[in-house]
Amino acid sequence: MKLDKKMIKLNQHFDTKEDAIRAAGQLLVDNGCVEPGYVNSMLERNKELSTYIGNFIAIPHGIDEGKKYIEKTGISVIQVPEGIEFGENHDDHKVVTVVFGIAGVNNEHLNVLSQIALFCRKVENVAKLADAQSEQEVIDLLKEVEE
């Protein structure tokens, strides 16, 4: 799967994790990957089970009922250098600095999820993503995910 510069937003700030998920979903909408209803599906998924995967990464994606809104497989990347809290309460600290929005046709997203998880298992890779200064730098860092 190929990343597109239009699907990457750098230096973003959000007050809530829901705002971050909406932004990741809106990039998918704006680039023709999903219909707007998919964004609510992403929010619902995060309510059911957190999309925080560790190492400062969240991968919001839709629930099964949201698949009807997917037009094509896509991935959005949102860099949040200051971090956004994805924990459920004040004692549950799960700071996220990179949000990956995912939509997959025919479960293609499962492969993408796996590839991102492998890349981001090294916290130094996540730090590079959080510090990237251009969309092209993010694409270059994630080339392993694309292949």
Image (tube, rainbow, N blue to C red):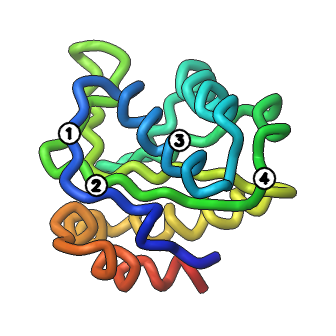
In the image, residue 37 lies at what x, y percent? Answer: 69, 29
How far apart are the two marked residues, 4 and 2, measured between alpha carbons?
24 Å
Looking at the rendered structure, the kind of residue marked 2 is Gln
Q: Is residue 49 above or below residue 6?
A: above
In the image, residue 55 lies at what x, y percent? Answer: 32, 52
Residue denoted by label 3 = 25
Residue denoted by label 1 = 13
Task: Give the mark, 4 or 1, whose residue is nearer the N terminus.
Answer: 1
Q: Residues within 10 Å of mark 1 (few under 14, many from 20)?
A: some
Task: Give the mark, 3 or 1, whose residue is nearer the N terminus.
Answer: 1
Q: How many marks?
A: 4
Task: Give the mark, 4 or 2, whose residue is nearer the N terminus.
Answer: 4
Residue denoted by label 2 = 79
Task: Give the mark, 4 or 3, whose residue is nearer the N terminus.
Answer: 3
Q: Is residue 52 above or below residue 119?
A: above
Query: Would residue 144 be found to the left or right of residue 45 on screen?
Result: left
In the image, residue 140 lies at what x, y percent? Answer: 37, 85
State the residue at coordinates (76%, 47%). Answer: 70
In the image, residue 57 lies at what x, y percent? Answer: 37, 50
How far apart are the two marked residues, 4 and 3, measured between alpha carbons?
13 Å
Looking at the rendered structure, the kind of residue marked 1 is His
Query: Would residue 111 be found to the left or right of residue 94 on screen?
Result: right
Looking at the rendered structure, the kind of residue marked 4 is Glu
- In this view, the residue in front, 5 or 142, is 5
Q: Secondary structure at mark 2?
A: strand
Residue denoted by label 4 = 71
Q: Quadrant of residue 92?
A: top left
Q: Residues within 10 Å of mark 3 (few under 14, many from 20)?
A: many
